[in-house]
Image (tube, coloured by chain):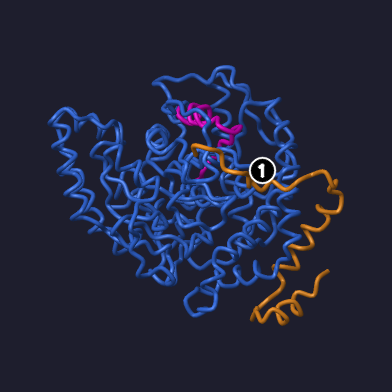
Amino acid sequence: MKDWKAMAKASGIEIDSVEPLEVLEAAFHPLVKDLAPGVEPATGWRLEEDGE
Amino acid sequence: MTIREAADALRARRVSAVELAAAASARIGRLNSTLNAFITVTAEQAVEEARQADAELAAGRDRGPLHGIPVAVKDLFLTRGVRTTNGSKVYEDYIPALDAAVVDRLRAAGAVMLGKLNMHEMAYGITSANPHFGPVRNPWNLEHSPGGSSGGSGAAVAAQLVYAAMGSDTGGSIRIPAAFCGVVGLKPTYGRVSRYGALPLAYSLDHMGPLARSVRDAALVLNAIAGYDRRDPTSSRHPVVDFVPDEGCSVRGLRIGFPENFYFERLDAGVEQSVRGALARAQSLGALVKPVRVPDIAALNTVGRVIQLAEASAVAEPHLEHREKFGPDVLALFDQGRLLPATDYINAQRLRRKLCREFDQVWSEVDCLIAPTTPNTAPRVGEKTLRLGGRDEDVRLATTRLVRGINVLGLPALSMPCGLGASGLPIGIQIIGPAWEEALILRLGAALEDGGVGIPPCPAS
């Protein structure tokens, strides 16, 4: 588990509670564990085509 | 009166566009002080536009069913010469020099613009309890939230201040207020409606769509706003069809999926009863209702939250040094997003691709899904937790639980009223379809509406 408080402090961010981030991380990281390297991000960048 | 009825009345000269605009302005004047649905009312401009609409109709220039119809837009759509606040202190004096694509298209269709609608600050929340412009109230019960973030849009349509309103939906922000306010809300497929000129919350999750009094009215608005726009890099060239369902449209043989997992867990009893009632009605109309297992929606929700946190903080970054300009809930979310590592964002986008592929399998079994829009009816203003299925749940997480994942998938989803809960507040049913199948989900919605699924008009007066 990341030390969100330390990360906030290092980033100069005043944060009241890191609990939401801890809960999110606990749900998120098990999902990432088994991702195959060939699964690419669903981000949509592409070169713009002529005429667009 | 629906858009279609008003349009008929206009063409039969039983009413003029100026009279419709004046009636809307008068109703806004009477009710907005309690509902707080509008941030800016453009009554004088509306009368001018209505006068022009009447002149065009008289001259035989008919722009279609929205010609002369009073509408309004959430205050994140840029409007030329009219302040656009994004529900935020950051934009409180911002007067755009251009119209958003959606506003352009509504104007081209002849709609008359009544003003800019209140919303959750920067569209980043589901209560519409705006700290700068005041909370929006639910017209069904002023002690309750209208939902959000398009809360002003939901309240304005429910209270019949306008015939239709535009909203945006990043994690449920059209469908939630539609459900809580007892109106129809449509989140189209990602890429179907241009995002150009709509202030962004999270680029890859933002969808623009209408809230309206009926399913066919929502379809009429979609007809006006759908289509490719080169100014939005995610806009699609997918063919646009006529989305308005025929009168007496049939759903015989349509395969409706009834999710066995996730969607019917931890629901308010009244919500479950009403949604099951609507499913039974669909079956009696000839649809084939079949149980189906859906992929991991909790995972989709988690992925959606990671993407939203990161993208929203990236958008807001230049403004975050002025912390005093933000409400505490929104500021906390921006701070959380700034702490997320880039690797989490990239991995969330990778999981998104994987989950999209998994979800695609559902469409080999059924044509669409029916589920509740929210597990609960509108909470009281300021309520922080809800008790559902014997468990206390954060209001924001509970309210977005059944809607957020669909934004990650980019699929079209329609919320329509299907009953009233024990407290007399509206309940919404959600129809989810495959990409680009808005016409199909609207047809099912219209058939249900024709078949008696719905609620009485809102008593606000």
Q: Which x, y percent locates residue B394?
A: 63, 63
Left or right relative to B120: residue B38:
left
Label 1 Cα crowd, 10 Å radius (few <14 / some 14-19 / many 20+): many
Most extreme residue toward the front, as rendered? A50
- Quarter of the view holding residue B364: top right
Q: Is residue B409 visible?
A: yes
Chain hosting mark 1: B
Question: Chain B rendered in what hue?
Answer: blue
Left or right relative to B144: residue B139:
left
Q: Quadrant of the N terminus of chain B?
A: top left
Q: Which residue is mark 1?
A: B263
- Quarter of the view holding residue B150: bottom left
Secondary element under disc 1, as helix, strand or loop, is loop
Q: Which x, y percent locates residue B311?
A: 61, 59
Q: Is residue B274 visible?
A: no
Q: Which x, y percent locates residue B51?
A: 14, 43
The answer to whether B150 is drawn above or below residue B246 in the figure is below
Identified at 60% across, 42% down, the residue is B410
Q: Nearer the viewer, residue B401 or B182?
A: B401
Count of labels shown?
Answer: 1
The answer to whether B152 is drawn above or below residue B188 in the figure is below
Q: Which chain is orange?
A: A
Q: Nearer the viewer, residue B62 or A20?
A: B62
Residue type indicated by callout 1: Tyr
Identified at 30% across, 39% down, the residue is B108
In the image, residue B283 lies in the stretch drawn in magenta: no
Identify the magenta region. Answer: B427-446
Left or right relative to B63: residue B449:
right
Identified at 63% across, 46% down, the residue is A44
Q: Which x, y percent locates residue B56?
A: 17, 35
